[in-house]
Amino acid sequence: MIKWQSINDISTNVFAGGTPSTSHAEYYDGDIPWIRSGEIDFNVIKSAERNISELGYNNSSAKKIRKNSVVMAMTGATVAKTAVVEIEATANQSVCAIETNEEIVNYKYLYYFLANNYFKIKSSAQGALTSLNLAMIKDIKIPIPSIKEQRNYVGILDTFTASIDNLKQQIELRKKQYEYYREKLLDLEGKDGVMMTTLGNIGCFIRGAGIQKSDFVEDGFGCIHYGQVHTKYDLSATKTISKIGEPLYRKSKKAVKGDVVLATTSEDAAGVAKPVVWLGDEDIAISGDAYIFHHKQNGKYLAHVFSSHRFFLFKIKNATGTKVVRISGDSMARFEFPLPSLEEQNRIVDKLDNFEAVISNLEAQLAYRQKQYEYYRNKLLTFE
């Protein structure tokens, strides 16, 4: 029979961090890693986003966290998430550090168990800020099999996480390659047979209107809401995620096959005018805060242009607003860029499609491996 013990009973120390006074610049940017709750996301921490100095450490309530410990976010967006700390570090007051008694519990076994029970722990958080406190964390009960069994569980789960990390690294590398070659392929200014033109010369911008999320229905006509361009769609789409009823659809502005749909509001200039090419056979309705770019070019080629560094620099100069950043159709119509023949556009799109296919395949592998990991983690660490 497995014995259950509290975190307090299986640890040598459980404590919260501290923050040096921000009015003293000399307290920061030293050599001591200082972890904040937002950095905790079921990960292995080998460095912190910010460091504090020895002077800042000595003049604050921050405490050293032993290497090979577990940390848990006590408040904020990552509340109840955990991470393994593989360096000696410090943390702010929103982070709980758990230094385990290694004669009783393996620190990575504890990490995997807490990660597996994340939703249960998070549901116990209290208050308007949805926070945990030290007493609540110390009282969490942990099943304690033998150290040999714990190490066996850790070995199995480490194999999965190593595979997941490897796939993430491959995806990151491929995305960097994709961005490099996209810029290289689009760098056509001055090339023979390539004319400089503006978006206004090759098409027109049509502003969407009149669709709210509350208008979505189960069965109806396809539509794209501007917010979905940011969160739900890749570079192109043949099916919509949402639908609206016929009366609203009939009076809406519509994108046809090949049109580029652009979300023209964002939190920052980098996100504004994010494109998605509509490649479905049916016309679809487009919401406000989005534009339809209608043209006779290769829509995916233009989407790559809208994603390019050249267009990013243009957005920085022409977007308006601070908290909500916008760009108008009139502004985008002035964007000048090199436009090759349709045949060359098709060739470039085919090359970039190959990169996208490789990335999509790796992302599918990653999703499958993560599901496997979660399944076996739950199977191994459920003792009730």
Image (cartoon, grey):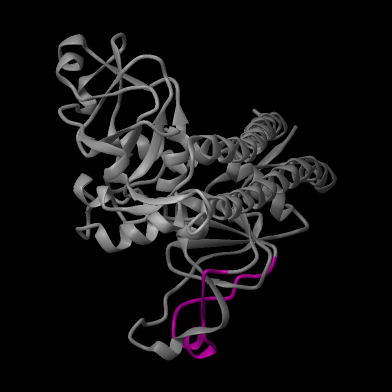
Q: Which quadrant of the structure image shows residue 369?
A: top right
**Figure disc tally:** 0
* Residue 9 seen anywhere in this rendered image of the structure: yes
Residue for point 33% across, 34% down: 261
The foreground one among 191 and 95 is 191
Q: In front here: 176 or 152?
A: 176
Q: In this picture, is 308 found above or below 343? A: below
- From the top left corner, tell me how far across and down residue 160 is, in percent: 74, 40
Q: Does the magenta stretch include residue 156?
A: no
Left or right: residue 346 versus residue 293 is right
Q: In this view, does 317 lie to the left or right of 83?
A: left
Q: Residue 59 placed where, x, y %?
A: 44, 87
The magenta-colored residue range is 48-67
Q: Quadrant of the C terminus?
A: top right
Q: Is residue 157 above or below residue 279?
A: below
The foreground one among 371 and 90 is 371
* Residue 363 location (% of width, % of height): 62, 36
Q: Residue at x 20, y 21 (%)?
A: 215
Q: In this rendering, does residue 131 appear at all? A: no
Above-or-below relation of 11 to 30: above
| Image quadrant containing the N terminus | top right
